[in-house]
Amino acid sequence: MLTLALDTATPRSSCALVKDGKLLCERETKAVAVLAVADTLLAEAGFVTGDLDRIVCGTGPGSFTGIRIGLAVARGLALALDLPLAGVSSLAALQEGAPGALPIIDGSRKEIFTLVGGEPAVMRPEDLQLEAGAVCVGDGALRYRSLLEAAGGEVPPDSSELHLVRARFHARLATDFGPAERVEPLYLRVPDAEKALER
């Protein structure tokens, strides 16, 4: 099974090519360039889009624009190539890359996206209840390092790979493949654009 996986929920997006559970190649990119990077990865590995068996996409939470771009690319490819698509939470993938750690994605607006009781949640970082010594990873952990450490958490160095949402982990976690239109974004709050329309 040749799987193309991508996640564009954070500023440091990722695209990976996985065959039968083995990572062939992976590249960090920008959301707007993810389709071109996917094409490059396929070419470097000696494949074409017609060789793909399935696609996996990060569903967020994270940047609204980033999530929309990733889903549009994944859905478009799945529909054009008649391939099954699976969605995987970006928080779950971040945690898969740092077992035992608490994933924290920067939510902007002085908020974070994280897991509370195993479920995705949005909150102010100062409202997060941490156990002493809890390891926090992700761009949200980096942004609010001092606050999290003051609350008893531990944040790996800024250069640590543990802070990146890697598409390879989406491929590892994906199980529920089906029609492209079934995969929905995980926003956790109303986008600014929709709020403006309500006024």
Image (cartoon, helix red, strand yellow):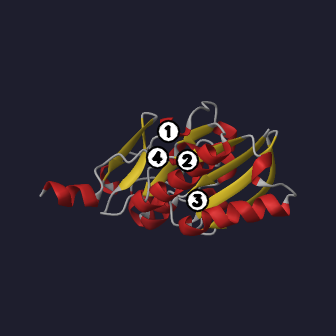
Give yes or no for contact between labels 1 and 2 (Cβ–Cβ under 8 Å).
Answer: yes
Mark 1 or 2 closer to N-term? 2
Residue at 59 percent of width and 44 percent of height: 79
Q: Which mark is residue 75?
A: 2
Residue 41 drawn at (x, y percent): 77, 61
User: Mark 3 and mark 2: span between their CA atoms?
Assistant: 27 Å
Where is residue 64, by image quadrant? bottom left
Is 41 drawn above or below residue 85 in the view shown? below
Give yes or no for contact between labels 4 and 3 (Cβ–Cβ under 8 Å).
Answer: no
Residue reaching furthest left? 199
- Residue carrying label 4: 132
User: Mark 3 and mark 1: span between their CA atoms?
Assistant: 30 Å
Residue 30 drawn at (x, y percent): 57, 68
Q: Element under label 2? A: helix
- Residue carrying label 3: 163
Where is residue 2, by image quadrant? top right
Mark 1 or 4 closer to N-term? 4
| Numbered disc in front, either 4 or 3 | 3
Image quadrant containing the C terminus: bottom left
**45 horizontally vs 175: left or right:** right
- Residue carrying label 1: 181
Q: Element under label 3? A: helix
User: Mark 4 and mark 3: span between their CA atoms?
Assistant: 20 Å
Kind of residue sitting beneath label 2: Arg
| Numbered disc in front, either 2 or 4 | 2
